[in-house]
Image (cartoon, grey):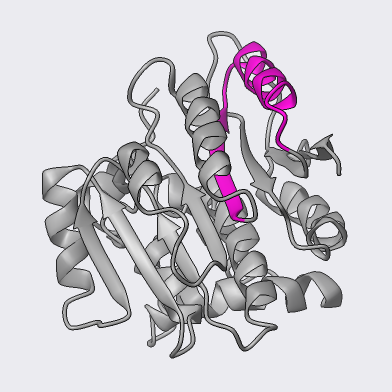
C-alpha cells in the first residue's frame, strides 16, 4: 500500500478524515484556553488537483468533486460547513482547483492563541510544506520522523489539543507501528486527544489492528469507518477509518448524523456503509 498524500488528495478518504478533524477542532474551540495540534505526517499542505500527481489517479473527482456542490440535509450541512469553508478558502474564485491537506485545514480554523506543529519526513514534501507556511508564526514545520516525534513533543506545553497520525502506509507493519506508538504516546500524555487514520483494504488486517487497540489498556477509543463499495479480490481501497482516543463527548452524536450522509454521497451506486463503535469505553 502507498497512500502518500499527493496522489490521493481530495479522495473519499480525505473527505471523511478532514470532516472528522474539523468537528474535533470545532469542539476544542469551545473553550478560550489555547491548544496545540501536532500533525505527525503532514505532507505538503496544499495540493493542485490539476497537477500531474492528482491527475494521475483522479481520485478527487469521486471525493471532494462529488460532494462540493451537493445540497445536504440541514443538520449534516451545518456540521460539514467548517470543512467546506476550508476547501473554498483555497479556491476563492469558487472553481475547485486546490485541495487543502490536514495542516492547512487545521491552520484555517486556529485562533490567535492556538499553535500547529506540522511534521514531515519526506525531503521534497517538507520543503513544499515550509513554503506553504512561510512567515506563519503560529505554525512550526519540522523535518522529522513523525513516529519519533511522538516521544519528544509530548505533552505540549498547552496540555490541550490533539495529535493527528496519518501515515502514508508505504511500509509493511504500519498498523502495528501505529498501535505501538499510540500506546507509548498515551503513556506520556494520557489526557491527549489522538486521531489515527487508516485505510480499509484488507479487513483481516484492520481487525488485527482493532484487537491490538482493545488489548492496549487505553480507555475511551472510538472507531469510525466509511466504506464506499464492497471488498474485492484482488483487494483495493474500499473504505476509510479513524480511531479517536479521548473523543469529544459530542463527536459520537455528530458522526451519527454525518457518516450516513457521507457514506451515501461518496459511495458507488448507493452501496456505502458506515460504522460507529466503541473499542474501549471508560
Q: Is residue 145 left or right of residue 227?
A: left
Of residues 189 and 20, the one nearer the viewer is 189
Q: Is residue 148 above or below residue 54?
A: above
Badge count: 0
Q: Is residue 66 left or right of residue 108?
A: right
Locate the N terminus and report the quarter of the image it occupies: top left
Tell me, yes or no, if residue 100 can be seen here.
no
Q: Is residue 273 left or right of residue 266?
A: right
213 in the magenta segment: yes
Q: Percent x, y for residue 20?
A: 64, 58
Q: Quadrant of residue 70?
A: bottom right
Q: Percent x, y for residue 30?
A: 70, 83
Question: Measuring 56% from the left and 33% from the top, which residue is drawn there?
Answer: 183
Question: Measuring 60% from the left and 71% from the top, which residue is drawn there?
Answer: 25
Q: Quadrant of residue 53?
A: top left
Of residues 113 and 135, the one nearer the viewer is 113
Q: Quadrant of residue 204?
A: top right
Q: Is residue 226 above or below residue 140?
A: above
Of residues 140 and 63, the one nearer the viewer is 140
Of residues 135 and 51, the one nearer the viewer is 135
Locate the C terminus and report the quarter of the image it occupies: top right
Q: Percent x, y for residue 237?
A: 54, 28
Q: Is residue 66 left or right of residue 27?
A: left
Tell me, yes or no, if residue 227 can be seen here.
yes
Q: Percent x, y for residue 135?
A: 17, 83
Q: Is residue 128 above or below residue 230?
A: below
Question: Measuring 51% from the left and 20% from the top, which residue is drawn there?
Answer: 176
Question: Measuring 52% from the left and 81% from the top, which residue is drawn there?
Answer: 34
Q: Magenta segment, which residues?
A: 192-218
Amino acid at each position: 500500500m502507498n497512500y502518500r498524500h499527493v496522489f490521493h488528495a481530495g479522495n473519499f478518504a480525505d473527505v471523511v478524515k478532514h470532516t472528522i478533524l474539523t468537528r474535533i477542532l470545532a469542539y476544542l474551540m469551545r473553550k478560550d484556553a489555547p491548544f496545540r495540534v501536532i500533525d505527525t505526517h503532514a505532507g505538503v499542505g496544499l495540493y493542485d488537483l490539476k497537477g500531474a500527481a492528482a491527475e494521475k489517479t483522479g481520485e478527487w473527482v469521486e471525493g471532494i468533486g462529488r460532494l462540493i456542490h451537493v445540497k445536504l440535509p440541514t443538520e449534516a450541512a451545518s456540521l460539514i460547513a467548517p470543512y467546506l469553508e476550508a476547501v473554498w478558502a483555497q479556491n476563492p474564485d469558487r472553481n475547485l482547483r486546490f485541495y487543502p491537506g490536514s495542516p492547512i485545514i487545521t491552520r484555517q480554523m486556529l485562533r490567535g492563541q492556538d499553535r500547529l506543529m506540522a511534521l514531515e519526513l519526506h525531503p521534497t514534501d517538507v520543503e513544499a510544506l515550509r513554503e506553504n507556511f512561510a512567515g506563519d508564526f503560529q505554525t512550526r514545520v519540522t523535518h522529522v520522523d513523525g513516529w519519533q516525534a511522538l516521544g519528544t513533543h509530548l505533552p505540549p506545553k498547552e496540555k490541550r489539543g490533539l495529535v493527528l497520525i496519518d501515515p502514508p502506509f508505504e511500509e509493511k507493519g504500519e498498523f502495528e507501528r501505529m498501535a505501538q506508538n499510540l500506546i507509548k504516546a498515551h503513556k506520556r500524555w494520557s489526557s491527549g486527544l489522538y486521531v489515527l487514520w487508516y485505510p480499509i483494504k484488507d479487513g483481516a488486517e484492520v481487525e488485527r489492528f482493532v484487537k491490538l487497540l482493545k488489548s492496549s489498556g487505553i480507555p475511551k477509543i472510538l472507531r469510525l469507518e466509511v466504506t464506499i463499495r464492497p471488498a474485492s479480490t484482488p483487494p483495493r481501497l474500499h473504505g476509510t477509518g479513524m480511531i479517536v482516543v479521548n473523543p469529544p463527548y459530542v463527536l459520537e452524536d455528530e458522526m451519527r448524523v454525518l457518516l450516513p450522509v457521507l457514506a451515501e454521497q461518496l459511495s458507488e451506486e448507493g452501496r456505502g456503509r458506515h460504522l460507529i463503535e466503541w473499542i474501549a469505553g471508560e
